[in-house]
C-alpha cells in the first residue's frame, strides 16, 4: 500500500526502464511537434482557431502525453507524489524563464536533477526515494522563487 | 465577382438571449465592411462566430482555403507565461526580417521588444503586436475587432 502511494524504485525492472525510455522519447517527439500550437491556443484560442489549429484535438494529444508521463512516474514516486513531480519542476522553471526555450530547458533539468539527487540522497539517509525526489524538486522551486524575488 | 464570405440567417444565442438575430450578408474580395454598434450589440460575438469559436444557427460559408487575419479586441496572456514576442511571431514561421517589417508597419522600430515576454508589455503595445502578427502572412481577409483599443493617438494615425 505504501509503495502505491510513495513508489519504490527497487521495483522498477530493466524492462520497465526500457519501456519508460522509449515512451519518454515518443512523448518528447509528440510534444515537440505540437507545442507551438498548444502555446498559441494558451495565449488566445481565437488566434489559434483563425490559424486552423484544431484546439480540442491538440488538447487531447497533450493530455494523452501527460497521462503517459504520469503512468511512467507512478512506479518511481507513487500515486501521491507524481503530480508534484510533473508540476514542481515546470513551476520552478516558469519563475526564472523569459521564453519558451529556457522554460523547456530548465523544466527538464530540474526534473532530471531532482530524480538523480533524490536517488543519491536515498542511498545516504535510507529513506523512500519518492518523497526525497519531491523534496529536492521543492528545494529547486524555493531557490527559483528567491532568485525571482531578489531579481525583482 | 465571387463572394469570399456568405452569411445566411446567422443567429447566436446565449441563455435564450439573441446576440445576433437572423443576420445575412455577403462579402466580395476588396470590399470593406464596417460594423458599428454600442457595447453589447454583438460585434465581437459576430466576429467570433465567423471564425468558428461560438456555436450558431444559420450558415457561414468562407471561400475555400481562404487565409484569414484576425485581430481580437483584447487578449489577456498570463503575466508570467514564458513566451517571448519573438517566439509568438515564430508561430507563423517567419524570419526576423519579415517580423521587423511587420513591426515597422505598426510603428515599432525598437526590436528589443522581441525579447520581452508577451504578458508584460502594455496593452497598447500588445495590440500593435497583434496587428503586425495578423498582417505578416499577407491574409486575404482581415477581421479587426476594435483594433485601436488601447493604442495611443500616434499609433492610430499610423
Image (tube, coloured by chain):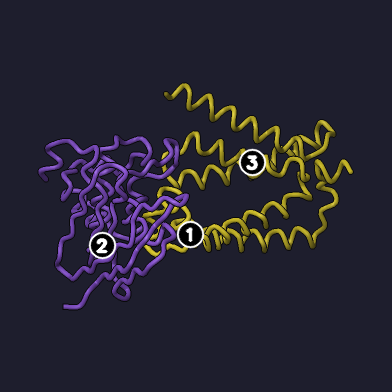
Chain colours: A yellow, B purple
- Chain of the residue under label 3: A
Q: Which circle marks residue B137 in the picture?
A: 2
Label 2 Cα crowd, 10 Å radius (few <14 / some 14-19 / many 20+): some
Q: Residue furthest bottom?
A: B1
Residue B141 locus on image (x, y percent) = 23, 64
Q: Residue at x 67, y 42 (%)?
A: A85
Q: Which circle marks residue A29 in the picture?
A: none
Closer to the camera: disc 2 or disc 1? 1
User: How many numbered marks have been drawn onto this rendered protein structure?
Assistant: 3
Residue A26 locus on image (x, y percent) = 61, 63
Provide the residue designation for mark 1: A55
Provide the residue designation for mark 3: A113
Q: Secondary structure at mark 1?
A: helix
The image quarter in which residue A18 lies: bottom right
- Chain of the residue under label 2: B
Closer to the camera: disc 1 or disc 3? 1
Q: Secondary structure at mark 2?
A: loop
Q: Residue furthest left?
A: B157
CA gap, disc 2 and disc 1: 21 Å
Whether A138 is drawn above or below B115: the answer is above
Q: Is residue B9 left or right of residue B78?
A: left
Amino acid at each position: 500500500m505504501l509503495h502505491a502511494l510513495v513508489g519504490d524504485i527497487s521495483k522498477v525492472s530493466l524492462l520497465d526502464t526500457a519501456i519508460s525510455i522509449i515512451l519518454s522519447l515518443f512523448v518528447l517527439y509528440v510534444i515537440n511537434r505540437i507545442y507551438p500550437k498548444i502555446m498559441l491556443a494558451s495565449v488566445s484560442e481565437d488566434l489559434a482557431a483563425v490559424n486552423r489549429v484544431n484546439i480540442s484535438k491538440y488538447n487531447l494529444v497533450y493530455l494523452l502525453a501527460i497521462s503517459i508521463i504520469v503512468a511512467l512516474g507512478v512506479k518511481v514516486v507513487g500515486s501521491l507524489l507524481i503530480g508534484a513531480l510533473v508540476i514542481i519542476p515546470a513551476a520552478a522553471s516558469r519563475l526564472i524563464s523569459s521564453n519558451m526555450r529556457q522554460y523547456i530547458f530548465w523544466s527538464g533539468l530540474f526534473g532530471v536533477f531532482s530524480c538523480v539527487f533524490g536517488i543519491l540522497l536515498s542511498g545516504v539517509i535510507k529513506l523512500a526515494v519518492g518523497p526525497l525526489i519531491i523534496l529536492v524538486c521543492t528545494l529547486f522551486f524555493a531557490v527559483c522563487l528567491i532568485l525571482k524575488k531578489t531579481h525583482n | 465577382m465571387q463572394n469570399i464570405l456568405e452569411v445566411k440567417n446567422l443567429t447566436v444565442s446565449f441563455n435564450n438571449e439573441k446576440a445576433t438575430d437572423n443576420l445575412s450578408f455577403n462579402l466580395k474580395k476588396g470590399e470593406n465592411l464596417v460594423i458599428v454598434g454600442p457595447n453589447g450589440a454583438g460585434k465581437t460575438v459576430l466576429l467570433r462566430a465567423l471564425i468558428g469559436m461560438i456555436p450558431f444557427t444559420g450558415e457561414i460559408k468562407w471561400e475555400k482555403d481562404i487565409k484569414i487575419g484576425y485581430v481580437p479586441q483584447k487578449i489577456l496572456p498570463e503575466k508570467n507565461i514564458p513566451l517571448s514576442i519573438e517566439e509568438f511571431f515564430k508561430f507563423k514561421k517567419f524570419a526576423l526580417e519579415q517580423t521587423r517589417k511587420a513591426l515597422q508597419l505598426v510603428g515599432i522600430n525598437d526590436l528589443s521588444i522581441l525579447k520581452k515576454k508577451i504578458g508584460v508589455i502594455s496593452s497598447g503595445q500588445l495590440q500593435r503586436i497583434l496587428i503586425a502578427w495578423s498582417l505578416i502572412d499577407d491574409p486575404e481577409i482581415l477581421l479587426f475587432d476594435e483594433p485601436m483599443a488601447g493604442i495611443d493617438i500616434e499609433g492610430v494615425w499610423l
